[in-house]
Amino acid sequence: MSKVIGIDLGTTNSCVSVMDGNEVIVITNREGSRTTPSIVAFTNTGERLIGQVARRQAAKNPKATIYAVKRLIGRSMDDPEVQRMKDLVPYDIVPMGEGERQYPGVQIGSDVYSPQEISAMIIAHLKEIAEDYLGEKVRQAVITVPANFNDSQRQATRDAGRIAGLDVLRVINEPTAASLAYGFGEDKDETIVVYDLGGGTFDISVLRLGDGLYEVLSTLGDPFLGGEDFDNVIVQNLVNEFYAEHKIDLSTDEAALYRIKDAAEQAKQELSLTTETMINLPFITLSGTEPLHIERTLTRQELEAWTLHLVERSLPYCENALKDAGITADDVTKIVLVGGMTRMPLVRRTVAEYFGIAVDPDVNPDEVVSVGASIQAGVLNGEVEEVFLMDVTPLSLGVETAGGVFLPLIPRNTAIPCEASEIFTTSVDYQEMVPVHVLQGESPLASENHSLARFELWGLPPLLRGMPQIEVSFKIDASGIVSVSAIEKATKHEANIKIEASGGFSEDEIQKMIDKAEAQREEDEHLHDLIEGVNAAKSSLYLTERSMKELGAYLKDEQKDNWKSHIDDARALLDKDPRDLDLEDLKLAKENLDAIQASVAEAAYKAMMGE
Ligand code: AMP
């Protein structure tokens, strides 16, 4: 049976794992790390870098280093978060898409990539890491998403998996995955709170675990609360202090900001281990010709004072999640912390105090989500038995009714998969079409919620108003993905629905992205083969030249001249850009060089023997 991998596709870091027997293995990447930065960079030589290597060159290539793309995926161009990102990131976000709605794309030179394609590059990289480890091709995956991702974001994430060449068997919620990992293999009865504070988002879920059944009781989140906010507070303080001292505003200096942000994040992380750290940024800017530096000690106490308000912002969500689950903090028996930010002592302390119990120190907050995804993968391909997952939909699903009012049909926290239906009718005699607007959200106003699709029911029988009875069914599958169907009850005719793919792009557009990514992968593989061919031929060239030099004294001049001219030809070939070369030519060049090397040795041997 081929393996199904579990992928935690994070805003800042991603993690891939796989089940091996009864155990989950978190797979180490090529740099020896168990998590990989969710960063893609495009270099000016046309190379694509992913992960740690992309991160390392970010400061000198800010416009073509793409990070936090998870904040864009599945959103439309007019989404306030996209506008916020445009102000925040150094890379260019431009509108793209063929339909009525415009979606954010990332501009690199003359190319525009959708967030799905960028995410697909990260997923494809994780897939390769898994394939290297397993020694076989991987075709299927379970991918996690924040619990509060709406239908568009889930579909877009699934599309990213498809573009990466994976069949995404299930999209599951990160906190649910975390709880799966926590309780796996043990027979426990617990009420678990999963508190997940990552790089960009905060999620809280309450689950009940008993007899292998994981039941999600409630889930809530703030998509605008995460580690970046903590970094920004530090950056803001450093920029303000610098301004107070030097009257120079560093907030408009992109290169300086990059360095400050990096140092801020590093200091924040160090202060989880120590109580004091140094922020040292020499030559941050110039005042006239005088170089200026940032040099300052930052204490844990200061950091905690600066960021307490951020940690406290998570508490009302905790309260509401408990309320939604119909329990109180006293009922909670276990807290599972997820996300890099939960390594911060202030976060651990605040959460422990709020729930009145200690946090589990054994759970690795960076890996637990991916581990859970692998367990779910194991359940789906039959490797794991006796684990059942009952998840819920995080947002109410409904339609717009007269006056722009939102009518919820499936309330949030309903167990999935689930379905609901609603009867629609006409408001004018002989009306041929009824428009339906499907939304997700909690506001009573349709305009305040997330629009999933607008579609039109056509082909209605010509009847007086109010007569046609169109039953529209809404289904949410186990991945939280919505589908809609409609039937006219009198004629039993299926209504003709024109529906836009909610993930952002039409099936055609996604197919184009899949083809493009496949072609790119082939191109990358070809380039990789060419570079390997060049390297192999270069090592033959080196050995042949060395033999010629060492044994030159035993060789005849005309032999030497003949071989030298071949060697010169080979060197000229190997100095070219690998992209302009041909694999066959490289193979031939290497064979020629190897043959010359053998001939040199043979001729020298004969000369030594006096033949
Ligand atoms: P995640 O999205 O779960 O990978 O979380 C990433 C966030 O966690 C980033 O903002 C990191 O700076 C932060 N983080 C990682 N390690 C630590 C640490 N030891 N202390 C505080 N924050 C951390």
Image (cartoon, rainbow, N blue to C red):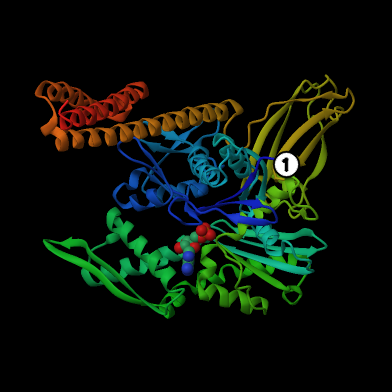
Residue 460 in the image: x percent, y percent? 80, 22
Residue 211, quarter of the rendered image: bottom right
Q: In which quarter of the image is the N terminus?
A: top right
Question: Closest to the observer: 280 or 180?
Answer: 180
Q: Where is residue 492 in the image (x, y as percent from the top left)?
A: 88, 24
* Residue 352 picture quarter: bottom right
| Residue 227 visible in the picture | no
Badge 1: how crowded within 10 Å, few (<14), some, or many (20+)?
Answer: many
Image position of 428 (left or right of 30): right
The x, y position of residue 564, in whole percent, is 16, 25
Image location of residue 477, percent across then percent down: 74, 42
Is residue 392 rendered to the left or right of residue 196?
right
Query: Which residue appears at 42% of the width and 80% of the height?
Result: 275
Which residue is label 1 attached to? 399
At x 35%, y 31%, the residue is: 533
Residue type at the position of mark 1: Val
Q: Is residue 502 visible?
A: yes
Task: Return the residue nearer the eye: 390 or 93.
Answer: 390
> Which residue is found at the position 63% from the left and 68% from the top?
316
Q: Is residue 582 left or right of residue 289?
A: right
Question: In this view, which residue lies farthest toward the right?
Answer: 490
